[in-house]
Image (cartoon, coloured by chain):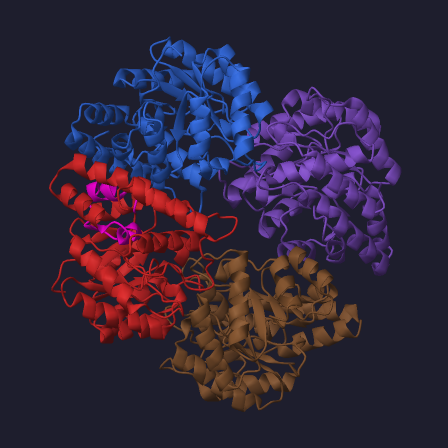
Chain colours: A purple, B blue, C red, D brown
Amino acid sequence: MDFDLQGVIPPLATPLDADGEIDRASLESLIAFQLDAGVDGVFLGGSTGEVALLDARRQREVLDIARDAVDGAVPLLAGAIDTGTARVIDLARQAVIAGADAVVVTTPFYVKPNDTEIAEHFRRVAAAVDIPVIAYDIVSNAQSRITPDVVCELAESNTIAALKDSSGDLVTFREITRRLPDFPALTGSELLADVSLDLGAKGLVPGLGNIDPHGYVRLYRAARAGDRQVARAEQERLLDLFRIISVADRSRVGFTAGALGGFKAALALRNIIKNPATNPPLSPLTDAETTRIAEILAEAGLL
Amino acid sequence: MDFDLQGVIPPLATPLDADGEIDRASLESLIAFQLDAGVDGVFLGGSTGEVALLDARRQREVLDIARDAVDGAVPLLAGAIDTGTARVIDLARQAVIAGADAVVVTTPFYVKPNDTEIAEHFRRVAAAVDIPVIAYDIVSNAQSRITPDVVCELAESNTIAALKDSSGDLVTFREITRRLPDFPALTGSELLADVSLDLGAKGLVPGLGNIDPHGYVRLYRAARAGDRQVARAEQERLLDLFRIISVADRSRVGFTAGALGGFKAALALRNIIKNPATNPPLSPLTDAETTRIAEILAEAGLL
Amino acid sequence: MDFDLQGVIPPLATPLDADGEIDRASLESLIAFQLDAGVDGVFLGGSTGEVALLDARRQREVLDIARDAVDGAVPLLAGAIDTGTARVIDLARQAVIAGADAVVVTTPFYVKPNDTEIAEHFRRVAAAVDIPVIAYDIVSNAQSRITPDVVCELAESNTIAALKDSSGDLVTFREITRRLPDFPALTGSELLADVSLDLGAKGLVPGLGNIDPHGYVRLYRAARAGDRQVARAEQERLLDLFRIISVADRSRVGFTAGALGGFKAALALRNIIKNPATNPPLSPLTDAETTRIAEILAEAGLL
Amino acid sequence: MDFDLQGVIPPLATPLDADGEIDRASLESLIAFQLDAGVDGVFLGGSTGEVALLDARRQREVLDIARDAVDGAVPLLAGAIDTGTARVIDLARQAVIAGADAVVVTTPFYVKPNDTEIAEHFRRVAAAVDIPVIAYDIVSNAQSRITPDVVCELAESNTIAALKDSSGDLVTFREITRRLPDFPALTGSELLADVSLDLGAKGLVPGLGNIDPHGYVRLYRAARAGDRQVARAEQERLLDLFRIISVADRSRVGFTAGALGGFKAALALRNIIKNPATNPPLSPLTDAETTRIAEILAEAGLL
């Protein structure tokens, strides 16, 4: 690996056009916006990118567009997220062909693996591709944790090159950064980014970074420079901004629809993408909800 | 739909050779064994078929082999099981091309849909293919329930042609059979098959039917004929046989590895398939565990 | 134990007056109504009796009233439900003093016991009182299951005299009745009472029996007489009646408030108790909800 | 309230003698040890004090001993932890009589309250006693969360005087400290005490403070003085020490037995209490496990 996995690496949304196809212009616009903000990498085809709702063709198209748009400016990470090892290897190989610099891989799901089987999964994926594999702990979606013991085993054997921790569990995150002080443990937390950096995170992978990458870049750089006051102030501003994921009425839409719909509505309101639609079967936001998101953006100085 | 979705329709295992490829001869042998036992349909690419651990190529290969082996003798059901609508539609269309008579579809998973989004998922899949869609409620793997209200809405609008209920919840199953007395509600339960038929199930989709289809066929026919004594006796014998899924040491292997490994070990011991291996990353059973499975088979008069 | 633990043994509601004190007249009325319906026992201070919301004084008062009202006509079961062994022994001894014929005891909760500790809990409670102990498996409230292995160990050592199974898991219930064919395994299920009797249940402990003991008595007697048609018809009628627990708006009240509030509203509407109030902090039902309950009662021929 | 709820307030273990009675000398010794270390309060009858496994008599005895041993030196907090409002009021009044300065109260459990009912619970308890009520969010034991909205409502109405947050959720903890900057939000976390103070915690309630109060006092004072280096170093030492709760073999004992047994074994090894026994039905530790705990204490410089 001839690049560092650190800094701010937002998991990008996947803009769609009115037909549900990838909106190339919007994706290029989003990537340009991110690079302009100074991000250290971009992550396509992650949970925020609605990877689980894309078919293989569009997933590949996202990577093709992203590779050209990024053009080597920063590392390009690609999600290879599926239920089991063989499916993930297929996606990972497709990502290699598309020019990704690393693949991001969750535990198997649907099939209820134990720790041994989770470790074996990562070993087989890593053996199948010659780009780095990043382990992605997102128990709320992928059902199983990647325990600190498994992370350490995989890191020490160079099976995985980094961890994206979206477990929400700072206790295990702290255990990992203590046991592996030089390992790139990245946090997926939008709300505890400053704290995670304090605890040894090497980088941030915040979904909210789609909407305000400048904020996370300032937060990260301030933290690295030891200026905790500035980092804290940015984090607090971002806490308020994160309310956009809670605007949608949960008696009407599911959690993912509300969160990713909120992100995309904000991106559209900021004119970074054209169309706020998410993939079926997620329910769309209402006009009133979108108006509320505009208010939150305005309060955060982003509109 | 010019066939009835009822009777015994086992979800078949997917035999693998030493290289992890589909073992055509073993799959043909398994299907012949099933047809010979008098099953009313076969279900390929379900949870028991390790669908989540197959790549698209092998999943297609399974269907191609099965179509030729079944040769129209009974309906061929194909799993189209993935995280979201677009991926499922891809799999469902592949199943149509391969000659499946119906597709079996779970809720979306990983993306945490609500009821509205689950219903929309089934409507879109049904609109995309012209073979019947069977809703598959397996909350332990697919995370969400399909509620009775959603089942009724989808059944009454002819969106779904049947339900495979592997929820383990007889209360909601009973509610569904009462509200939809003519709808093909099938149960995935190995252990409460007799009870489910009493409560209005139109058929059985038991993983254990791989190993002893004759038993489930006898159970089903006896229940249909009103001979509850015989049905009960068969069910009780099958309860004992089901211990094969609990042989593997759970401190060593995950749940799925133990259950599906147990099924495949039994099939190999009965000489129905050649190789008991499951897909990576599932851990294999030990020799001692296989010996114990042989004992259980012998006790059940199957060896 | 000089009585049989079998038949219909409803877990009685605890009627309160306007001050939240035990309403003696209403409790006497409820017990008379039950005895008149032909129940085989009554269970005071169970989950349906709001035991977790009563203080020790009122819990004792309930038993004193019940003992006099029952007057030896049928066995009197008393809940001894609390977080740990010492607290449960206190309650159990109080029940002995009050004249209970048996105590009903859940697993410890709050303290996350394992199976060994659960078994030890029952052994210590049983050693502390000289009336029979009935194990009560209600995982939804008491957090832990009582596994079939633990039930068998406790039954075979005569530690427990019966099981009340409110786990909702017919698979383990069936395992228990097969392993212990003569053991009084009772079901707490309102909706699968007929099925549970088919599977070997020796009795019924249905909360809905408060409102319609005659129905459960008919169901039970028909099942015992081998008249499955009649049992089924009664069960189906009771399925419809059970809708009273789902009337309350769950965006306004918690599950227990809706369920127990529904029971008490129905009892008040039937003039069996005077006041439908539940204990604080449970939210009361609205007038509109009570009207809806009246409609359901009328449809069931109970008003 | 004429005292500040801040600083280090360990939730004390309840030492038992060989007969399971309260070991007065050991409890006095433990309290003297704590006061000598400079703690700012002591909390008796909490989860760490095995409150759920004590009967009312011993619970009262603990408070009587503690009141005399503390003798006004620091505030004395008493747990009033039970399933419902009436039972909690009984315990809270007993605590008042025993001389407690505040009571610590969880959500109701067993009865599945919603947010409205949880708030009502705290209002009723607060109205029943004239000492401050501290809300205790420990979802892993008490089943329900106390949401930030409920905390704010109860704090702003002066219903609760403080929060002990053992939810493990720093996101909601941060939300609470931001919305209520002057409110005494205390953390129950042993492992993220430094981080919690950074995020606005006013104090620490760590079970591990039984064994090493000096460490938490140093950590707290360093954090208050703005010396983050020292606070971090203490926290890291305490992270290692916390391994004592994971020594017990979880295939043999439950979680609580292992954790509280580990604490008590360490206290006995340090000669602060005499007997490491926990209450039935918790399983005791083995000699080998105790030896391992001694090693961890030695590594931490505590033996």
For the N terminus of chain B, which image quadrant?
top left
Q: Is residue D27 above or below residue A219?
A: below
The picture places residue D71, in percent across and down from the top left corner, at: 57, 91
Magenta stretch holds residue C197: yes
Report which quarter residue D240 is drawn in: bottom right
Residue C51's place in the image compared with C144, above or below, is below
The answer to whether any part of residue A84 appears in the image is no
- Residue B54 in the image: state x and y as whole percent: 51, 26
Residue C146 vertical position relative to residue C200 in the rendered view, above or below = below
Judge left or right: residue A213 versus residue B164: right
Q: Is residue B256 magenta?
A: no
Q: Nearer the viewer, residue D125 or C226?
A: D125
Q: Which residue range is magenta in the image?
A: C190-213
Q: Could you say which is closer to the camera, residue A156 or residue A245?
A: A245
| Residue B187: % across, % down | 34, 30
Let me know if residue B71 appears in the view.
Answer: yes
Q: In what quadrant of the picture does the C terminus of chain B appear?
A: top left
Residue found 50% across the figure and 31% down from its top: B107
Q: Nearer the viewer, residue B140 or B245?
A: B140
| Residue C100 location (% of width, % of height) | 22, 69
Q: Residue at x 73, y 37 (%)?
A: A290
Front-most of D107 and D253?
A: D107
